Image (cartoon, helix red, strand yellow):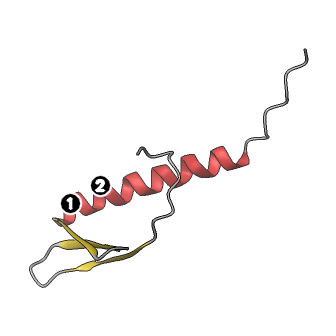
């Protein structure tokens, strides 16, 4: 499965600070999957920058007109 592969799996996402000074991204998916991901604040800021860049790129893709069909 890649980034462009559709999926029917649903999940809940929580993001917040831990009591140890880390930033936790907590993913809970169907089937009892729980995935706590801890990052130091600098890593979390890098992830936030990547999310912003991806959102900007996705927005640009969404604004492009659909390609015209080729004439035969």
Judge left or right: residue 38 versus residue 14.
left
> On the image, numbered disc 1 is attached to which residue?
42
**Where is mark 2, residue-wise?**
46
Q: Secondary structure at mark 1?
A: helix
Vertical position of residue 10 compared to residue 69: above or below: below
- Residue 1's disc is none
Mark 2, other Cα within 10 Å: few <14 / some 14–19 / many ≥20: few
Where's the N terminus, which quadrant? top left
Percent across and percent down for residue 72 are 90, 14
x and y, in percent, of residue 30 in the image = 37, 74
Please name whichever residue, 16 or 26, is drawn nearer the observer in this view of the structure.
26
- Mark 2 near mark 1, Cβ–Cβ under 8 Å? yes
In depth, the one of 34 and 18 nearer the eye is: 34
Residue drawn at x 12%, y 85% is 19
- Number of marks in the rendered image: 2
- Residue 61 location, x and y as percent? 64, 44
- Above-or-below relation of 65 to 13: above
Quarter occupied by residue 16: bottom left
> SS for tag 2?
helix
Which residue is nearer to you in this view: 33 or 42? 33
Q: Viewer-proximal residue, 62 or 45?
A: 62
Query: Local crowd at mark 1 within 10 Å, few (<14), some, or many (≥20)?
Result: few
The outermost residue toward the left is: 20
Give the CA separation, mark 2 to mark 1: 6 Å
Q: Is residue 65 above or below residue 16?
A: above
Q: Is residue 71 left or right of residue 32?
A: right
């Amino acid at each position: 499965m890649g980034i462009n592969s559709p999926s029917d799996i649903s999940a809940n996402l929580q993001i917040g600070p831990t009591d140890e000074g880390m930033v936790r991204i907590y993913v809970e998916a169907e089937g009892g999957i729980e995935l706590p991901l801890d990052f130091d604040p600098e890593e979390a800021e890098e992830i936030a920058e990547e999310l912003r860049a991806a959102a900007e790129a996705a927005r640009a893709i969404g604004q492009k007109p659909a390609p015209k069909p080729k004439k035969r």
